[in-house]
Amino acid sequence: MTPSRPYLLRALNEWILDNDLTPFIVVDASLPGVDVPRDFVSNGQIVLNISPGAVRSLLIDDETLEFTARFGGVPRLVSVPIVAIVAVYAKENGQGMVFGSEPGGSPDDTPDKGPKKAKKSSKVGAEKSKPAERPSLKIVK
């Protein structure tokens, strides 16, 4: 199946705008292909206002989010791979979603292998690692 993240991102952006709120996204700026103003990156992340009043020509397709905006008065094209978007939320009340990992949802995933798993500890007598938790849905009010 195709990744759900671009569909959820488009839907949540529309839902936030329909409620007259301001959509913000959190981007992992350390991933390859992220083209954002580096002066505004903090702790490897950047928070971007994607409301119609803040950006021009917003495009959210299945692979990339792109728009033009002003940063410090200078117009700039911003391009972010969908897999680099960590969360989308409404500025005013924090309602939204933090994205987890899904097959095809990170640059390290391949269609044949799925997400990479963490290596097990090789320590003698180490406790067995817990099985990966199943994804779960959260109710967004």
Image: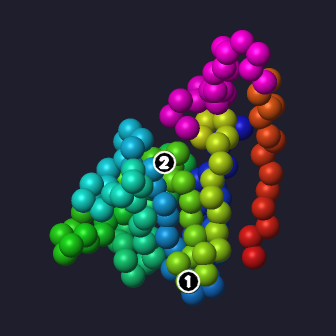
Instruction: Tell me what residue is drawn at x 54 percent, y 48 percent.
Output: 62
Q: Amino acid at mark 1?
A: Glu
- Distance from disc 1 to disc 2, alpha carbons, whole Å, reads 23 Å
Dividing the picture into quarters, in which one does residue 38 lie? bottom left
Check if residue 126 falls in the magenta segment. Answer: yes
Helix, strand or loop for disc 2: helix
| Mark 1 or mark 2, whichever is nearer to me | 1
> Is 3 drawn above or below residue 23 in the view shown?
above
* One can see residue 58 in this view: no
Where is residue 56 shown, x and y percent of the image? 35, 71
Where is residue 93 shown, x and y percent of the image? 61, 81
> Is 101 drawn above or below residue 85 in the view shown?
above
Check if residue 43 falls in the magenta segment. Answer: no
Where is residue 90 shown, x and y percent of the image? 57, 76
- Front in this rendered view, residue 58 or 85: 85
The answer to which of marks 1 and 2 sits earlier in the sequence is 2
Please tell me the numbered disc located at residue 92.
Answer: 1
Q: Amino acid at mark 2?
A: Ala
Instruction: Tell me what residue is drawn at x 39 percent, y 50 percent.
Output: 44
Q: From this viewpoint, which residue is outermost toward the front?
A: 125
Helix, strand or loop for disc 1: loop
Reading the image, the residue beneath label 2 is 84
Instruction: Tell me what residue is drawn at x 25 percent, y 69 percent.
Output: 71
Which quarter of the rendering shows the N terminus? top right
Crowdedness of circle 2 by 10 Å Cα count: few (<14), some, many (20+)? many
Q: Which residues are magenta?
A: 106-127
